[in-house]
Image (tube, rainbow, N blue to C red):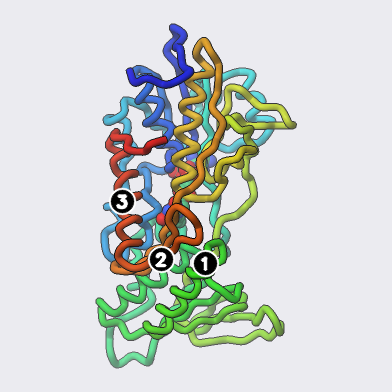
Amino acid sequence: MAFLPFYIPAAKRLKVVIVGGGYAGIAALTALKHYMPDIDITIIDPKAQHLKITHLHETFRYPLSDLLVPFADLEAGFGCRHVRAALTFNEDTVRQWQTEKCLVVNEEVLTFDYLILAVGSASRGFDSQEYVLNLQDFTDAAGSALLARYLTAENDKSEQTLSVVGGGATGIQFLFEIQQFLCRQKIRCKIRLINSCEQVLTQFPDGFDTYVQSRMRDLGIDYYPNTYYLGQQAGKILLKNKQTGEQFALSSDVSLLFLGKKQENLFAANAVGQLVVDRKPLDRIYVAGDCAYYNAFGSNALTAQSAVRKGKLVARNILRHSGRLKILEPYLHRDIGYVVSLGSADAVGWLVAEGNIVTGLPALTIKEIVETQYDLLLMGIDTYII
Ligand SMILES: Cc1cc2nc3c(=O)[nH]c(=O)nc-3n(C[C@H](O)[C@H](O)[C@H](O)COP(=O)(O)OP(=O)(O)OC[C@H]3O[C@@H](n4cnc5c(N)ncnc54)[C@H](O)[C@@H]3O)c2cc1C
């Protein structure tokens, strides 16, 4: 059994239920198994496979199956159990779970010593409609197959147009992948980016916007800043100028919406990851990942890096809480970089300090290293320093 500082185990074999098998849930699973190999873990997740979602825009190059890790494989590799279900809960439910230390799923009663909620955060979007693709659509089918429904490579067709809506990290990563995909497939199609702000990637330093806009100009991608998306109909997209309020339509065969994450239904947690309800921490229920806002010095960014660190932290703190010392560790993780890929051969990112911008191959290499680190974690090899 690996050494964990401030952890003197009590005799009992622990039972932990993890709700949500994304980045935070998997990080918690691997860390718990690392320090207590015989721990009893159940993961509840509605999907049959864990999705490596940080690669999702790459399904224009690779099959979606490359990004899926069946929960059955994780059950075999880590000796845990997967229950396929989407749990619904509110503050009353979690208070009841804390008291009773059990929950009911698929008519089965699951008892636990500790519960981890790691359900991620939902994407903003419009109800699903024709000629519109949301992030959710890309989790069910590869990007190449989805675009084939709307665009054709036949040369005799009048010029086609595709609109990407949203200039955040996800929209930009999809935009550049799509541009390359259309070139490779020799599909004649104009691409435009619709963005509600003046700049793209506003959560990052200014250099990101400058670099991305110059690459968009080089590749002939049209940019509509300060523009709201109103809707997509057969052959046209409806838009509104944010400054003048003027509404207008442009020709468009399909719109892809990447409108960011909803900042609602976030669970408040204290500095050690325990869920806080009515200002009281619940010492048997921990939260991690995009769904968790920690009252701590560490980063609450909605990133895979923060999700993994929160997942690992709650695992360590659960073990310490179950042990004899009960000295828990506060959440201090700060992201040390973030890279946005711009197709298969280019990227822009920051490393170590936000002003330290890297582009091109060096940036892409950093991204690949970070993603390889997560792939290794899925195989049970933990290369994260903390
Ligand atoms: C296209 C894309 C690219 C990205 N690229 C990067 C990147 O390069 N670097 C980076 O740091 N971050 C990136 N991110 C952000 C990163 O993916 C998220 O921050 C990370 O996935 C959050 O992990 P999580 O475990 O909190 O949630 P998720 O990974 O979303 O996992 C949540 C899990 O909970 C399950 N679930 C949901 N509701 C329930 C329920 N009611 N009951 C049970 N289970 C439930 C879901 O099925 C899912 O498996 C990217 C995101 C996207 C969409």
Determine the residue positioned at 66% across, 27% down.
281
Residue neighbourhood size for the residue with mark 2, other residues' Cα within 10 Å, grouped as few (<14), some (14–19), many (≥20): many
- The Cα–Cα distance between marks 3 and 2, rounded to whole angstroms, is 15 Å
Write down the residue under mark 1: 201
Q: Which mark is first along the chain, 1 or 2?
A: 1
In the rendered image, residue 48, in percent from the top left (x then y), is placed at 36, 42
What is the three-letter code of the residue carrying label 3? Ile
From the viewer's perspective, is residue 284 above or below residue 343? above
C-beta proximity under 8 Å, tags 1 and 3: no
What is the three-letter code of the residue carrying label 2? Val
Write down the residue under mark 2: 348
Foreground residue among 138 and 181: 181
Q: Which mark is residue 369?
A: 3
- The Cα–Cα distance between marks 1 and 3, rounded to whole angstroms, is 22 Å
Determine the residue positioned at 44% across, 59% down.
350
The quarter in which the N terminus is drawn is top left
Residue closest to the far right? 278
The quarter in which the C terminus is drawn is top left
SS label for mark 2: strand
Determine the residue positioned at 42% across, 12% down.
13
Q: Which mark is first along the chain, 2 or 3?
A: 2
Residue closest to the far top? 11
In the picture, residue 190 is in which quadrant? bottom left
Task: Select label 2 or label 1 by which is in front.
Answer: 2
112 displayed left or right of 150: right
In the rendered image, residue 131, in percent from the top left (x then y), is placed at 47, 74
66 displayed left or right of 359: left
Q: Is residue 60 visible?
A: yes
